[in-house]
C-alpha cells in the first residue's frame, strides 16, 4: 500500500510540474512575445505608409525627411540637412518623428 501511495504522489507531482511550465509559457507569451509582435506589426505598417515628406529616424539615430521612395529596391532617399541626401534601406527606418524635432525648429 505504501508503494502505491508513493507512485500516486509522484504522478501528481509530474502533473503539477506540467501545469507550472504551461503557466510560465503563457506568462512569457502575454508579457514578452505578444507585445513584441504587436510592435513589429506597427513598425511594418509605418514603413509601408512612408511617403515623400515624412519625417523619420533611422536605426542609426539619424533624423531626416524622406525625399524619394523607391519600391523596387526597397530604399529611401532621406535629406538629413539642407542639400545633404543619403540613400538608406527602408527596413532601417524605425519611427516617425514630430516635424519640429527633425528640422531642429
Image: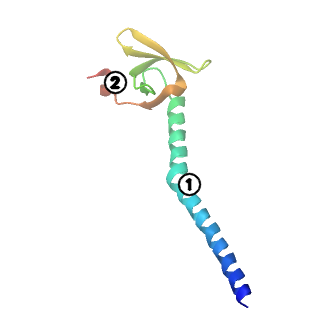
Residue 18: image x %, image y %?
64, 67
Please state if 9 lies on the left or on the right of 105 as rendered: right
Mark 1 vs mark 2: which is more N-terminal?
1
Distance, label 1 to label 2, CA atoms, is 36 Å
* Mark 1 crowdedness (10 Å alpha carbons): few <14, some 14-19, many ≥20: few
**Residue 12, picture quadrant:** bottom right
Residue 103 — which label?
none
Identify residue for label 1. Answer: 29
Please state if 96 lies on the left or on the right of 19 as rendered: left
SS of the residue under disc 2: helix
Residue 85: image x %, image y %?
43, 12
Please state if 8 lies on the left or on the right of 67 as rendered: right
- Which residue is outermost to the front? 2
Quadrant position of the C terminus in the picture: top left
Residue 62: image x %, image y %?
40, 22
Residue 102 — which label?
2
Is residue 43 positioned above or below 8 on the image?
Answer: above
For the point 53% across and 35% down, the residue is 45
The residue lying toward the viewer, choosing from 63 and 53, is 63
SS of the residue under disc 1: helix
Disc count in the image? 2
For the point 52% across and 30% down, the residue is 47
- Which residue is outermost to the left? 105
For the point 57% across and 64% down, the residue is 23
* Mark 2 crowdedness (10 Å alpha carbons): few <14, some 14-19, many ≥20: some
The residue lying toward the viewer, choosing from 68 and 86, is 86
Q: Which is closer to the viewer, label 1 or label 2?
A: 1
Quadrant position of the N terminus in the picture: bottom right
Is residue 53 positioned above or below 84 on the image?
Answer: below
For the point 31% across and 27% down, the residue is 101
- Which residue is outermost to the bottom? 1
Amino acid at each position: 500500500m505504501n508503494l502505491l501511495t508513493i507512485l500516486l504522489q509522484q504522478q501528481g507531482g509530474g502533473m503539477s510540474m506540467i501545469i507550472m511550465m504551461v503557466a510560465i509559457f503563457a506568462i512569457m507569451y502575454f508579457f514578452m512575445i505578444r507585445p513584441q509582435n504587436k510592435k513589429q506589426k506597427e513598425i511594418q505598417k509605418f514603413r509601408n505608409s512612408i511617403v515623400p515628406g515624412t519625417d523619420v529616424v533611422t536605426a542609426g539615430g539619424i533624423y531626416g525627411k524622406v525625399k524619394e521612395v523607391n519600391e523596387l529596391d526597397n530604399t529611401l532617399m532621406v535629406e538629413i540637412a539642407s542639400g545633404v541626401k543619403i540613400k538608406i534601406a527602408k527596413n532601417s527606418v524605425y519611427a516617425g518623428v514630430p516635424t519640429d524635432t527633425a528640422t531642429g525648429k
